[in-house]
Image: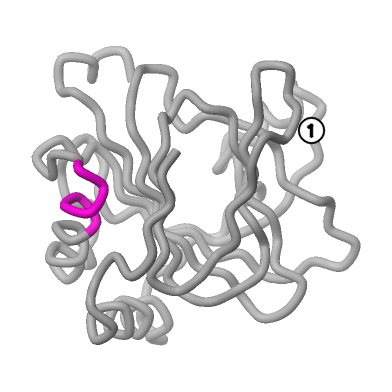
């Protein structure tokens, strides 16, 4: 795992934040921050649900919304600082988390995909609501606090979990890098 601050110039950090908080930014409601709309999976696993909002800008290496071109220079900065090839960006997902009374220490543990991949998790704003990392025994081994302009880069097969902020909102940008040869397995 690698933590990098000031991933991009301040003017770009501010621009990315402004894009995310515009009234016409298309946030979608998710019943659970971890399992998207796969409610049956969360029920089957008997896990509690923690609602959030999401915006899927890219998937399957292709733009899914008009936001993808607006953030292309931001993605180049993220890829460059992470040391990852921007040509293998498989998914770009924004997440917004709001305070929830009596929230647990962290949301449900998960991996984003079941194939080898790398994740660059970029924090769009200053907030509390850390990202937690776990070992194979599901014990917390690390946690990263959101800070505007900070990014944590990690092996995507590492169990991790978001957490809800205690005040205001938390916005993150999850960029998944996958070798195209593995795509059929995603």
The residue positioned 25% from the left and 28% from the top of the image is: 178
Callout 1: SS: loop
Q: Is residue 73 left or right of residue 137?
A: left
Name which quarter of the figure residue 68 lies in.
bottom left
The residue positioned 20% from the left and 66% from the top of the image is: 74
Q: Residues within 10 Å of mark 1 (few under 14, many from 20)?
A: some
Name which quarter of the figure residue 155 lies in.
top left
Which of the image's four quarters has the C terminus? top left
Percent from the top left, x then y, of residue 61?
17, 39
Percent from the top left, x then y, of residue 19?
31, 80
The residue positioned 42% from the left and 64% from the top of the image is: 150
Is residue 79 found inside the magenta-colored segment of the image?
yes
**On screen, 68 above or below 2?**
below
The residue positioned 23% from the left and 78% from the top of the image is: 9
Q: Please give the range of residues in magenta.
A: 78-83
Which of the image's four quarters has the N terminus? top left
């Amino acid at each position: 795992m690698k933590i990098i601050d000031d991933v991009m110039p301040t003017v770009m950090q501010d621009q990315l934040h402004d894009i995310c908080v515009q009234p016409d930014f298309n946030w979608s409601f998710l019943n659970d921050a971890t399992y998207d709309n796969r409610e049956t999976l969360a029920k089957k696993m008997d896990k509690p649900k923690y609602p959030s909002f999401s915006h899927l800008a890219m998937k399957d290496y292709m733009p899914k919304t008009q936001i993808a071109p607006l953030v292309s220079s931001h993605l180049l900065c993220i890829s460059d600082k992470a040391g990852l090839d921007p040509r293998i960006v498989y998914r770009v997902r924004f997440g917004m988390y709001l305070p929830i009374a009596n929230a647990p220490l962290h949301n449900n543990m998960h991996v984003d995909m079941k194939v080898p991949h790398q994740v660059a998790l970029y924090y769009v704003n200053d907030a509390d609501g850390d990202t937690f990392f776990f070992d194979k025994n599901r014990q917390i081994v690390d946690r990263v606090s959101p800070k505007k302009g900070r990014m944590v880069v990690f092996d995507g097969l590492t169990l991790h979990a978001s957490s809800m902020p205690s005040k205001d909102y938390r916005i993150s940008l999850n960029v998944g890098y996958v070798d195209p040869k593995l795509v059929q397995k995603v």
